[in-house]
Image (spheres, rainbow, N blue to C red):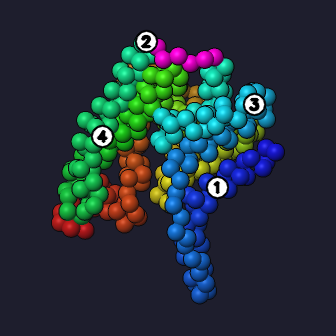
């Protein structure tokens, strides 16, 4: 039953979200022999990435004995279809949501006030910051060859601000909306750009996804229990699949691969002896700066529409195309 549940969930996600991606990738190879596979006109169901992971957590937690099945189908349906977080997260686990249904939920003034504040903070992030920065970022990525390297650097930093305020803003609005109705969601972002290491970054960024990948994929693959090489492989695998979860593109695969590789390097580094000054405030500041710079540079893969745009932006960042159209 567990295998059937996982296969159905991943099968639906794979078909709707990744069928054409894999067909395009396979066609590039098959075309050498004069073969090809036709794409399908598939309409992607809204929020499928989120409720697929939510329903999988339900099944896996029951299988592991960490959760009792829902009391009724209506409780399970409410968990899957609860609207605030359905489109853009956070990923809500059944172990956090279903116990809240054991008691009658009342609309209370304190929850309305707290939820409204959280919602408005998210709305401010989204409308006033993310949407204000977006036109500049869009313009540079549409015609990267027409902008100077310094403008492109500003664009990369601006996109780091945009994606944080956009994504955390949506999460805050979902958390606030649920709170108004009396439901508690876990925090999804915790000032991630103040992280001094890439490991710390993933403990603070999109917490519901990173913890899901850790608990249901990384640990299931063996975690750090089967030697150093296996640990690094598990980290890389989890992040590659996490990158692919964000979108059906090789850009996301490369993005996940780079994060996984740096996570593995940091894991290896943490096991090495450190000099006495390593815990100083200066090292912390340098760690925050270098982590933010790495994350920002890799966001280029996340934002670029295709490999040509990605290459053009990186050439500008490296001052290889200083002037004029590329």
Q: Secondary structure at mark 3?
A: loop
Q: Quadrant of the N terminus?
A: top right
Q: Nearer the viewer, residue 139 or 10?
A: 10
Whichever of callouts 3 and 4 sits on the residue coming sooner in the sequence is 3
Q: Nearer the viewer, residue 174 or 136?
A: 174
Q: On the image, numbered disc 2 is attached to which residue?
A: 110
Query: Is mark 3 in CB contact (under 8 Å) with mark 4?
Result: no
Q: Nearer the viewer, residue 273 or 14?
A: 14
Residue 64 screen position, x and y as percent: 78, 32
Q: On the image, numbered disc 3 is attached to which residue?
A: 69
Q: Residue at x 36, y 39 (%)?
A: 166
Region of the chain picked out in magenta, as a range: 103-108
Whichever of callouts 1 and 2 sits on the residue coming sooner in the sequence is 1
Residue 141 screen position, x and y as percent: 29, 57
| Cα–Cα gap, marks 3 and 2 | 31 Å
Query: Is mark 3 in CB contact (under 8 Å) with mark 2?
Result: no
Whichever of callouts 1 and 4 sits on the residue coming sooner in the sequence is 1
Q: Which mark is residue 130?
A: 4
Query: Is mark 1 in CB contact (under 8 Å) with mark 2?
Result: no
Q: Which mark is residue 324?
A: none
Tag nearer the camera, 1 or 4: 1
Could one spot residue 316 in this view of the protein? no
Q: On the image, numbered disc 1 is attached to which residue?
A: 12
| Cα–Cα gap, marks 1 and 4 | 32 Å
| Cα–Cα gap, marks 3 and 1 | 23 Å
């Amino acid at each position: 039953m567990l295998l059937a549940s996982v296969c159905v969930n991943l099968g639906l996600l794979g078909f709707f979200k990744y069928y054409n991606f894999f067909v395009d990738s396979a066609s590039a190879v098959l075309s050498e022999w004069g073969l090809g596979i036709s794409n399908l006109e598939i309409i992607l169901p809204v929020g499928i990435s989120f409720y697929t992971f939510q329903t999988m957590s339900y099944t896996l937690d029951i299988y592991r004995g960490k959760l009792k099945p829902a009391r009724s189908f209506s409780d399970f349906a409410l968990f899957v279809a609860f609207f605030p977080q359905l489109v853009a997260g956070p990923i809500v686990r059944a172990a956090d949501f279903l116990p809240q249904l054991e008691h009658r939920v009342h609309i209370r003034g304190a929850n309305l006030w707290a939820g409204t504040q959280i919602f408005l903070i998210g709305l401010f992030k989204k409308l006033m910051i993310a949407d204000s920065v977006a036109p500049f970022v869009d313009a540079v990525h549409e015609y990267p060859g027409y902008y100077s390297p310094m403008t492109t650097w500003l664009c990369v930093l601006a996109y780091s601000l945009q994606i944080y305020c956009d994504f955390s803003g949506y999460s805050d609005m979902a958390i606030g909306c649920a709170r108004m109705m009396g439901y508690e969601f876990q925090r999804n972002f915790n000032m991630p750009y103040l992280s001094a290491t890439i490991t710390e970054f993933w403990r603070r960024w999109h917490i519901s996804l990173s913890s899901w990948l850790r608990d249901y994929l990384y640990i299931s693959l063996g975690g750090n229990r089967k030697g150093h090489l296996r640990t690094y492989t598990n980290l890389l695998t989890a992040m590659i699949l996490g990158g692919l979860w964000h979108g059906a593109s090789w850009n996301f695969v490369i993005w996940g691969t780079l994060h996984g590789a740096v996570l593995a390097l940091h894991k290896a580094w943490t096991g090495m002896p450190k000099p006495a000054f390593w815990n100083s405030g200066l090292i912390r500041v340098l760690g925050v700066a270098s982590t933010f710079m790495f994350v920002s540079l890799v966001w280029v893969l996340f934002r670029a529409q295709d490999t040509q745009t990605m290459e053009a932006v990186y050439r500008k960042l490296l001052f290889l195309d200083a002037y004029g159209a590329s």
